[in-house]
Image (cartoon, coloured by chain):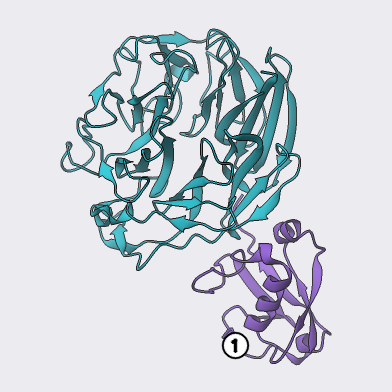
Amino acid sequence: MSGVRVLVGTRKGAFILTADGKREQWHIDGPHFPGWEIYHLKGSPADPNRLYASQASSWFGQVIHRSDDGGKTWSTVGNKFVYEGVPGTHQWYDGTPHPWEFKRVWHLEPSLNDPDVVYAGVEDAALFKTTDGGETWHELAGLRGHGSGPHWQPGAGGLCLHTILLDPHNPDRIFIAISAAGAFRTDDGGKTWLPINQGLKSEYIPDPNAEVGHCVHRLALHPARPNVLFMQKHWDVMRSDNAGELWHEVSGNLPTDFGFVIDVHAHEPDTIYVVPIKSDSEHFPPEGKLRVYRSRSGGNEWEALTNGLPQQDCYVNVLRDAMAVDQMDPCGVYFGTTGGQVYASNDAGDNWQAIVRDLPAVLSVEVQTLP
Amino acid sequence: MSVIRVTIPHHLRTLASSGAEVAVEVDGPVTQRSVLDALEERYPMLQGTIRDHVTQQRRPFLRFFACKEDLSHESPDALLPEDVARGREPFMIIGAIAGG
């Protein structure tokens, strides 16, 4: 493997950070799409030169760009996201019915084996798919049609479908998560969906054990073991060993179990990473210390990783799509902050360096391991 | 056939790879709808950025000015001023001054 390409979406544009396999010297390229909010950009696992980017703007709505040369040049593709049929209503913040309205694409998940196939998670929550490289998009409407849709309610960030995990062993199985509806799974390629929230407990909803209504912030899995899921919930770090059928808490000795990101080591399925955030009322690290926590036991036992990270007066946040791992050995771990720093570790989290310090607030971080 | 001058805001110029002002040809009555239809036909990447794809409603943070008047709340099928139809004045698409 020749190197890595880190794709960073920010409040004011996209940046592409590249390095060789040592991951010590970095080249910063950007901003791409300056001035636009880039919620997410991601490369195709089947073709590393094929990238997709989601641009959004309160003024001009949604735009999707595609690159066929690794981000050197971009062209616009389709931006028409229309809900299938009569959209109906979900709940508004005050509990009243509110019509489904498309606002933006939060997450783009390219297929594992076809560069022209991409899934898009959008606000208001729905899952769309393209099979022609982004030119046209159609909704996988079975998700909103599951029956619980009228009861979904937005989190503070909106009613967003922010996580899409494709099962590498089963092309018909997809996991998604919605704030604040919960996690769902399809086993038939998106036709029908099952809520997978049993075992979650959320004190901020009327029935803490409800089937839907949980504010799931992020899901992660290891490709070699896709039945084991990890979740950073609004509060609580959770784990399921049966593809989401049942969850149990693995927060263990974390200083706080609130947070947004969670990810899994590329080569060790039981090594997971989170960045604890003080609380839902105070979106910054506890004690002003930016610490990644690593568990090598699949949860419960956590160690603080601090070398190279600010340990005083640090009050940034790390948003839900802003952590990623590369496939190198040792595994690289990356995350971005609302303060505009992108931190990288080329030794699985033992040591960190800021690749870049002064970007706009980071919304998303993805990494490609280049052949 | 009328040649209509249209000014577009910075971010749309970037998307369209155009200058601040573009010219579009309109066949028939010169209205907001016919001008925007012509603009989107010439620059398809602008579809959905000025008007909603489905409802065709103007995006809330955009305004339409011409001849020192705000035409944003006029009917999309109302005739635009004669000076716009004759190409003496531009139809201006303006982004609201808001946000950070």
Question: In which quadrant is the C terminus of chain A drawn?
Answer: top right
Tell me what residue is drawn at x 37 percent, y 40 percent: A172
| Shown colour of chain B | purple
Taking the image as shown, residue A317 lies to the left or right of residue A301, namely right
Please tell me which residue lies in front, B72 or A231. Answer: A231
Taking the image as shown, residue A198 lies to the left or right of residue A90, namely left
The image shows residue A62 at horizontal and vertical percentages of 57, 56
Please tell me which residue lies in front, A195 or A96. Answer: A195
Tell me what residue is drawn at x 50 percent, y 53 percent: A104
| Whether residue A4 is situated above or below residue A331 in the rendered picture | below
Residue type at mark 1 is: Asp
SS at mark 1 in the image? loop
Please tell me which residue lies in front, A67 or A225. Answer: A225
| Whether residue A301 is situated above or below residue B4 in the rendered picture | above
Residue where numbered disc 1 is placed = B77
Q: Quadrant of residue A150?
A: bottom left
The image shows residue A63 at horizontal and vertical percentages of 60, 55
Tell me what residue is drawn at x 43 percent, y 41 percent: A162
Subunit ID for the residue under disc 1: B
Tell me what residue is drawn at x 72 percent, y 63 percent: B9
Taking the image as shown, residue A8 lies to the left or right of residue A229, namely right
Q: Quadrant of residue A99?
A: bottom left
Q: The chain drawn cyan is chain what?
A: A
| Whether residue A141 is situated above or below residue B28 in the rendered picture | above
Q: Quadrant of residue A28?
A: top right
The image shows residue A61 at horizontal and vertical percentages of 57, 59
